[in-house]
Image (cartoon, helix red, strand yellow):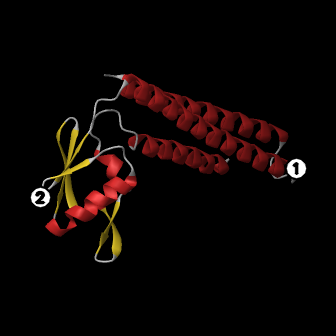
Amino acid sequence: MSDIKAFEEKMNRSIDALAEEFSTIRAGRANPHILDKIRIDYYGSPTPLQQVANISVPEARIILIQPWEASLIKEIEKAIIIADLGLTPNNDGKAIRLVFPELTEDRRKELSKDVKKKGENAKVAIRNIRRDANDLFKKQNKANEISEDELKNAEDSIQELTDKYIAKVDKCVEEKTKEIMTV
C-alpha cells in the first residue's frame, strides 16, 4: 500500500503545476508572477528578471521594474516585448512601468475558457495517474504479490484519491474563474 503515497504525490504535483499555470494568467490586476519566465541577457548568460531588477506593485494595475544597472533598461524592455505578455513597457530611463489595462468582457470570457481548459488537462493527468496505479495493482495481483481483496482495497483507495484531487482542480478552476470575472 506504500505505492498509494507515490501516486498521491504525483497527483499533488499535478495540482501544483496547475496553480503555477494559473499564476501566469493575468486577471486585470498587476501580478508580478507573469514576469517569472522572462530571462535577460546579463553578461552573456540568460538571467531571471528578478535577479537583475527590483519588481514591485505600487498600484493595483501597475508593475514597476527598477533594474540595478541602468544599462539593462533596453534589454529588459526588449525581453518583455519578446515575451508577448500583451503589455507595452513604458520606459522613463530609470525604470519600466507595465500598466495593466482593464479587461474587456470578451477577454475575461476568453481567459475563463483558457482556465477551464487548463483545469481539464490537470484532470486528465490525474486520471492517467489513477490508470497507472490500477495497472500496477493488477500486475501485482497477477504476480500473486497481493490478494484479490488487497487489489479491491487498493483500487478503492486510488479512486478516493482521484475524486479528492479532481475536486481540488474544480475548486482551483472555480476560484480563478471568479477572480477573472470580477470587475
Residue that mark 1 sits on: 142
- Between the C-alphas of marks 2 and 1, the distance is 68 Å
Q: Residues within 10 Å of mark 2 (few under 14, many from 20)?
A: some
Q: Amino acid at mark 1?
A: Lys
Kindly identify which residue carries mark 2: 94
Dot 1: few (<14), some (14–19), or many (≥20) neighbours within 10 Å? few
- Residue 151 visible in the picture: yes
Q: Residue at x 53, y 31 (%)?
A: 116
Q: Which residue corresponds to the image point at 33% horizontal and 59% vertical from the top-left?
A: 79
Residue 146 on image: x %, y % = 80, 48
Q: Nearer the viewer, residue 158 or 50?
A: 50
Q: Position of residue 101 (x, y in %)?
A: 28, 34
Image quadrant holding the C terminus, namely top left
Residue 164 lies, with reference to residue 84, above or below; the image says above
Q: Secondary structure at mark 1?
A: helix
Q: Position of residue 144 (x, y in %)?
A: 86, 51
Of the residues tagged 2 and 1, which is closer to the observer?
2
Q: Amino acid at mark 2?
A: Lys
Q: Earlier in the sequence, mark 2 or mark 1?
A: 2
